[in-house]
Amino acid sequence: MSHMHIEESVRNSLQSYLRDLGASEPDDMYNMVVNVVEKPLLEIVMQHADNNQSKAAQWLGLNRNTLRKKLLEHKLIT
């Protein structure tokens, strides 16, 4: 899957979200998008890295401690 395909999917989803709001104004969209994208991103990368946090952190361009914190926040590890 190309970067453009992911970008297009996000763009389409956001347009639908805003359209569905109608006259209501959005609230805290940045955090909403980050949260709904971050968890599946972490899940998939961890699966492909065979749950190796060091490898996953490297793939994501994150410090291993940062990855661990995010995994805990999303309840992907205990």
Image: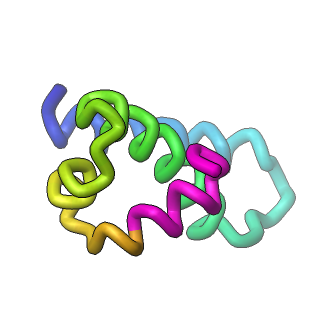
Q: Is residue 36 magenta?
A: no
Q: Residue at x 74, y 64 (%)?
A: 26
Q: Residue at x 45, y 37 (%)?
A: 43
**Which of these two is toward me, 6 or 78?**
78
x%, y% of residue 72? 60, 59
x%, y% of residue 42? 42, 46
The coloring applied to the image is: rainbow
Q: Which residues are magenta?
A: 67-78
47 to the left or right of 12: left
**Which of these two is toward me, 59 or 78?**
78
Residue 8 visible in the snapshot: no
Q: Residue at x 40, y 43 (%)?
A: 41
Q: How many marks?
A: 0
**Which of these two is toward me, 77 or 15?**
77
x%, y% of residue 33? 56, 56
**Which of these two is toward me, 6 or 19?**
6
